[in-house]
Image (cartoon, rainbow, N blue to C red):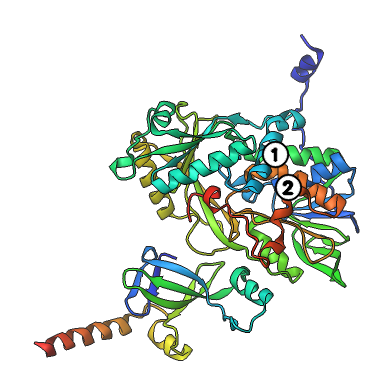
Amino acid sequence: MKMLTCPINGARPVSEFVCGGDVQPMPNPSTADDATWADYVFNRHSIPSVKQEWWCHTPSNTWFIAERDTRSDQVFRTYLYGVTADDAAQDTAVPDKTVQSEAVQDASSEARSHE
Amino acid sequence: MPLRLIKFALAREHPEPRMFRQPDCLRSSYDVVIIGGGGHGLAAAYYLARDYGITNVAVLEKGYIGGGNTGRNTTIIRSNYLTPEGVKFYDESVRIWQDLAMDFDLNLFYSTRSHFTLAHTDSAVRTMRWRAEVNKHYGVDSELVDASEVQAACPQMDITCGGHAPIMAALYHAPGSIARHDAVAWGYGRGASDRGVEIHQQTEVLGITTRSGRVTGVQTSQGEISTSCVLCAVAGSTPRILQMVDLRSPLYIHPLQAMVSEPMKPWLDPIIVSGSLHVYISQTARGELVMGASLDPYELHSTRSTLDFAEGLSAHMLELFPFLSHVKIVRQWAGMADMTPDFAPIMGKTPIEGFYLDAGWGTWGFKATPVSGKTMAYTVACDRPHELIRNFSLERFEKYDLVAEKGAASVGH
């Protein structure tokens, strides 16, 4: 993987990103027993598979989720936390030239309207 | 002139002596099945046969022996670790290494070079001093030295590191050594095979059967084996094997890359490691510079290598040794490092009766090949963990009883 698509900034070199580890559901810290909590803190699902991972675009401090195959290093989609899968597929799945150029046009028309 | 030499000169054929027997097929059962034909698995087989007379053993290797991390590491052997458990464990390994070539009657190119871990900051100097004190306490030859001693041992080094990360001091470890990694696998393999152990290459484990929490058998690509004793020593492939027995672990798998330069005249005697620059280097008997850096920054089950690794490592290496700027890189490769949260291995028994684990070797496994073989052989033969590995149990995580070796185990964090 050489390029990764940040949901806010678009496709950027992978050196601008930091992986924050797997998306894991957190047990309730006040009710979880010690074994469950230790399992959440330490244990990992390290089998090659398509996983949801936290990634951060460090220049813009944008945290987002990427679905990546940890064997082939292929990223299927990236999306902000809280956005549904459908929204994600439309906005950020693949570097889509039409989506990006619309964004650029919107930005430039906004700039003109401010003058 | 010796008769054997005349016979050799006159013979028409000179068949290559084989290092180990290759049995045609698997038998239906074995006393012990070792999954993984790398240094660790073969060493365990060797000591099981040699020290305990347990020879009805099969070592199953999905590729070729030593083709995993055993053949991909940067061959550094040292015992200058941070924790008492770590120091005792790795020191025992260094002791075994020193006579290993004689035991095998095989040239391992084992060469004691001395080892400098460079400190470029006050906190690094503190860590080096801490390591030196713990090492000395356990009889390991390490001491804190100043930058002038590093310069004297390595005149070609730029002590200012390009001006922005000057070396302040270093942890000097006289027993630091390098060896020919493949030869260790062959030596242990031949020794095990000569004593009756069967080595089966191109044999992949596809499943492990258990009943009532006990191992009963192993399914492989070459057939099924019934056994009540399995030792898993597969490094980066460990999570896939653990899944077969429904065990969770803290292991996370990242590629670790390395590269080697063209051969050149010997100029680098010691092994140099820099935690701040995240690079390390040594020169082999063939004159090549073997270099490594930090782990790849994200999980990947692959041994692909990248250009940015070579660029990043070269940039930092040139800060240390600017005169290398025209040297060519001949080869780069990667292994799959099975990392743990505390940078210490996971060894011993597991909640599954008869299933023994030797894993969590991350970036620190090659140097431990002899001691891991020895302690795992004891553990399997006696069904209890060897005292040197008691602190490395899988259970330590749920007890929050971690062995804090991050300061001494790797260059990249």
* Chain letter for mark 1: B
Residue wearing tag 1:
B92
Badge 1, how many Cα within 10 Å: few under 14, some, many 20+? some
At mark 2, the secondary structure is: helix
Q: As displayed, is residue B285 above or below residue B332?
A: above
| Residues at marks 2 and 1, CA–CA distance in whole angstroms | 9 Å
Q: Position of residue B269 (x, y in %)?
A: 49, 28
The crowding category of the residue bearing disc 2, from other C-alpha atoms within 10 Å (few below 14, some 14 to 19, many at least 20), is some
Give residue B34's quadrant in the image.
bottom right
Image position, residue B184 (x, y; %):
69, 39
Work out whether residue B121 or residue B31 is closer to the camera in this orientation and state it: B121
Q: Are marks 2 and 1 in contact (CB under 8 Å)?
A: yes
Seen at 52% across and 50% down, the residue is: B407
Identity of the amino acid at label 1? Glu
Q: Secondary structure at mark 1?
A: helix
Mark found first going from the N terminus, 2 or 1 = 1
Residue on which disc 2 sits: B388
Expressed as whole percent of the image width and height from the top left, the position of residue A51 reads: 55, 75
Q: Which numbered dot is residue B374?
A: none
